Image: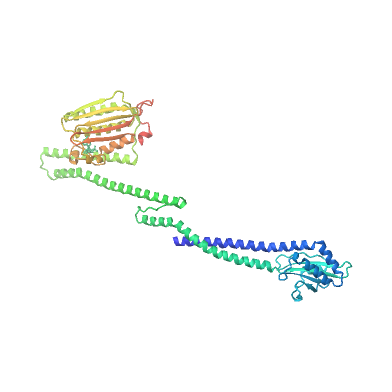
């Protein structure tokens, strides 16, 4: 491709030079020819309107040695007439027959044949007429003696050889210039095309590498022109494609992991259900207490499956962006107190001490109250679940002007630092057996983060193994804008996205 582009460039340059030279040649040749013609007729007009010369010629025409006299006069004016014998000559012709009598070129044989101007002059008229495209220039002036008895024609004839010679020389010069121009333009276009095409060749190589899956090749750009811009854009595009591909690969890997996790999570309770159901079906002599114990396990496992499916459905709604969130103004303090009340019994059963401490005048928030309470419930359930008997769960609330902060701290088992980055991952559980045993799906924190994120807030977790965990939820304060209050389903962009 580059070779062909290069030869195209060279071809264009050479063609341009040839075209240019041809135009110059045509104009110059025409110019030279016109100049000679104009100059000839101007000169003739000046000389032949010279009264002294014309009077002298007329006077000479009446003398017996008229031809000699006239010759002498014309010799005097030869310089002014531009007579050079080779190209331009004067002739004295007989005024009646047009026959050659004398001339600057004394060889009568070389006298030009009677031209239109000569014929005209024989009728007594001065003939300056020039015919376009003629190969010669001529002027014929009749000269008659005063008494009218003798008459002559003074005839100037120029065969244009000088103009032709000049044109030929110019043609030669221009041909040489074309040859030199050809070499120079070929050399310049080769150098130019190399400079121009180098980045394009680089891009071609990079594009080929990209087609083969290698995005690391970067084009080195030094120029700031259009090609430089193109190369830079190309580099940018390559790095963007590379990162998009990496993201896609990561997303694909996560998707596979997720599908594997879902299958695994659903298969475990299913296996349990199947085993117990089979045992019940195949053994009719199972004691009723054992049978009802089996049935309880089956119910528990199917509840767990239902929970997993419910949570998954919820997450997939968040992923699809189809989760509708209500936007209502509500007291965050009241919500957290309600959730605490709901869980207090569980906490007490586990021998945990639960304390709530709220700052005065906590700002209200705007959002989906039920969802936020669902998050609180999940965090509090975790705190209760992962704190051994005798421990504490502290709930504190505070707020700055534009945000509200709820912190739920426990004195439980904590989370090992290596697990911390993953606790928000779907199905991630530090201790699988323990979580499953307590009915956890490993999806609670993922859902919590989605919900808080959609409300424009954030959720942070802090933990030391053996000492406890502290989860902080920060939400934008949004209820104090003079709005009417608990208005239910009014849509709110900020809450939804
Ligand atoms: P699960 O349903 O298993 O509780 P979550 O998504 O709510 O799932 O939590 C993910 C994991 O984070 C839990 O399995 C647990 O290992 C850990 N975790 C969450 N909260 C606490 C806590 N308060 N104390 C100790 N570990 C916790």
Q: Position of residue 71 (x, y in %)?
A: 80, 70
364 on left or right of 267: right
Q: Please state which of residues 55 and 178 is positioned toward the viewer in this rendering.
A: 55
Is residue 267 among what the camera can see? yes
Residue found 32% across the figure and 41% down from its top: 319
* Quadrant containing the N terminus in the rendered view: bottom left
* Quadrant containing the C terminus in the rendered view: top left
Q: Please state which of residues 14 and 446 is positioned toward the viewer in this rendering.
A: 14
Q: How many marks?
A: 0
Q: Position of residue 173 (x, y in %)?
A: 60, 65
The quadrant of the picture showing ligand 1 is: top left
188 on left or right of 240: right
Residue found 22% across the figure and 43% down from its top: 265
Q: Is residue 228 above or below residue 154?
A: above
Q: Quadrant of residue 21?
A: bottom right
Q: Position of residue 297 (x, y in %)?
A: 16, 39
Q: Position of residue 180 (x, y in %)?
A: 54, 64
Residue found 88% across the figure and 66% down from its top: 146
């Amino acid at each position: 491709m580059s070779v062909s582009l290069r030869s195209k460039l060279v071809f264009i340059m050479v063609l341009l030079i040839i075209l240019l030279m041809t135009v110059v040649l045509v104009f110059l040749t025409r110019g030279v020819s016109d100049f000679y013609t104009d100059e000839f007729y101007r000169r003739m007009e000046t000389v032949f309107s010279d009264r002294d010369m014309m009077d002298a010629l007329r006077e000479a025409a009446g003398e017996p040695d008229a031809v000699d006299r006239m010759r002498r006069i014309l010799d005097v004016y030869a310089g002014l007439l531009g007579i050079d014998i080779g190209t331009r000559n004067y002739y004295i012709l007989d005024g009646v027959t047009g026959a050659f009598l004398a001339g600057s070129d004394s060889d009568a044989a070389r006298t030009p044949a009677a031209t239109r101007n000569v014929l005209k002059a024989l009728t007594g008229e001065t003939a300056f007429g020039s015919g376009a495209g003629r190969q010669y220039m001529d002027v014929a002036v009749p000269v008659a003696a005063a008494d009218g008895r003798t008459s002559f024609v003074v005839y100037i004839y120029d065969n244009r050889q000088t103009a032709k010679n000049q044109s030929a020389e110019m043609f030669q010069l221009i041909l040489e210039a074309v040859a030199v121009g050809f070499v120079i333009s070929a050399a310049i276009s080769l150098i130019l095309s190399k400079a121009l095409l180098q980045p394009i060749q680089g891009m071609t190589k990079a594009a080929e590498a990209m087609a083969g899956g290698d995005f690391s090749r970067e084009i080195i750009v030094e120029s700031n022109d259009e090609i430089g811009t193109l190369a830079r854009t190309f580099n940018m595009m390559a790095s963007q494609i590379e990162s998009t591909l990496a993201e896609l690969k990561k997303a694909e890997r996560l998707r596979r992991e997720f599908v594997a996790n879902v299958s695994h999570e659903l298969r475990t309770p299913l296996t349990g259900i199947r085993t117990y159901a089979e045992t019940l079906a195949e053994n009719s002599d199972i004691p009723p207490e054992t049978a009802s114990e089996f049935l309880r396990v089956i119910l528990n496992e199917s509840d767990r499956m239902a929970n997993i499916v419910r949570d998954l459905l919820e997450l997939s709604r968040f992923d699809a962006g189809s989760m509708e969130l209500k936007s209502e103004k509500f007291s965050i303090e009241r919500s957290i107190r309600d959730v605490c009340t709901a869980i207090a019994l569980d906490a007490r059963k586990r021998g945990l001490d639960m304390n709530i401490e709220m700052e005065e005048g906590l700002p209200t928030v705007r959002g989906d109250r039920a969802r936020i309470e669902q998050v609180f419930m999940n965090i509090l359930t975790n705190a209760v679940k992962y704190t051994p008997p005798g421990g504490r769960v502290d709930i504190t609330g505070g707020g700055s002007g534009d945000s509200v902060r709820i912190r739920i701290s426990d004195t439980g088992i904590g989370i090992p630092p290596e697990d911390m980055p993953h606790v928000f991952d779907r199905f991630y559980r530090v201790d699988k057996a323990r979580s499953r045993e307590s009915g956890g799906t490993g999806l609670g924190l993922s859902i919590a983060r989605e919900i808080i994120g959609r409300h424009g807030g954030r959720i942070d977790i802090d933990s030391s193994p053996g000492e406890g965990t502290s989860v902080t939820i920060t939400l934008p304060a949004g209820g104090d804008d003079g709005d009417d209050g608990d208005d239910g389903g009014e849509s709110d962009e900020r809450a939804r996205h």
